[in-house]
Image: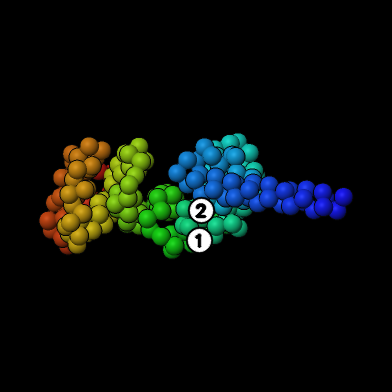
Amino acid sequence: MRTGLASALWHFALAIIALVAIGAQLDRQSRYQPELSRWVPGPLRAFSQYHIALEASQLQDRQVALSEARRLIARRPVPAEHLALLAALQLQDNPQGRGLVTIQQAAKRGWREPLSQQARLRLALAAGDYREAALRLAAIWALPHDDETLEELAPRVLQHAEARQALAGLLADRPKWEGAYLRRGKEILPPEIMADIAARTRRGTLAPEINGSAAPR
């Protein structure tokens, strides 16, 4: 009887180990196949937790989304995009609350994280800090990006003379970036804004400000 019980316990242990191994493999694979995330057992979610939290963020229940995002940070606290997701949810819940601190932390961990750059850009626009908004726009422009996001943000930022001046300064200092800017800029920016930025770039950082915040006519 003892032999039978020991054998059963042994096989049970092997089954548990196999399930854990399968769950861990599914979790790793979910980095490339997000649809697998839902099949990963909750205690084993690490990589898959990002997709779970991201999916929850698209639902109406903010508390569920915040809970999943906090669980993500507890399990994988290092990646900047994880903090950026939490910050975006916090800012939706309270625009003047903890999210402002979280987004700063995300930005410090990596400028290549698009969500944190977008959030900082929108905060800068809301505060009237058009120079900072232009710097965040340049960071987004340098990343593999969602074209719709760039099409939305670039005209909103660059309608302001201060933002055009800041972007012109970057183009003057980093001419290698000008090709990427021109290729996309001519498709999403009005010709008068493109012409003004080009003129400011030629003059370097000494270009005078245009009165007002509207685009030049």
Circle 2 SS class: helix
In whole angstroms, how far apart are the C-alphas of marks 1 and 2? 8 Å
Residue closer to the observer: 133 or 102: 102
Q: Which residue matches tag 2?
A: 82
Residue at 35% x, 37% y: name it.
148
For residue 139, side relative to residue 169 (left or right):
right
Residue closer to the observer: 13 or 7: 7
Residue 78: assigned label: 1
Residue at 18% x, 52% y: name it.
178
For residue 31, side relative to residue 136 (left or right):
right
Q: Amino acid at mark 2?
A: His
Expressed as whole percent of the image width and height from the top left, the position of residue 53 reads 57, 45
Q: Amino acid at mark 1?
A: Val
Expressed as whole percent of the image width and height from the top left, the position of residue 54 reads 53, 43
Residue at 22% x, 48% y: name it.
181
For residue 16, side relative to residue 160 (left or right):
right
* Marks 1,2: beta carbons within 8 A: yes
Expressed as whole percent of the image width and height from the top left, the position of residue 173 reads 19, 62
Expressed as whole percent of the image width and height from the top left, the position of residue 57 reads 56, 42
Is residue 90 visible to the viewer in this orientation of the structure? Answer: no
Residue closer to the observer: 157 or 179: 179
How packed mark 2 is, by other alpha carbons closer than 10 Å (few <14, some 14-19, many 20 or more), is many
* Quadrant where the image shows the C terminus: top left
**Residue 56, quarter of the rendered image:** top right
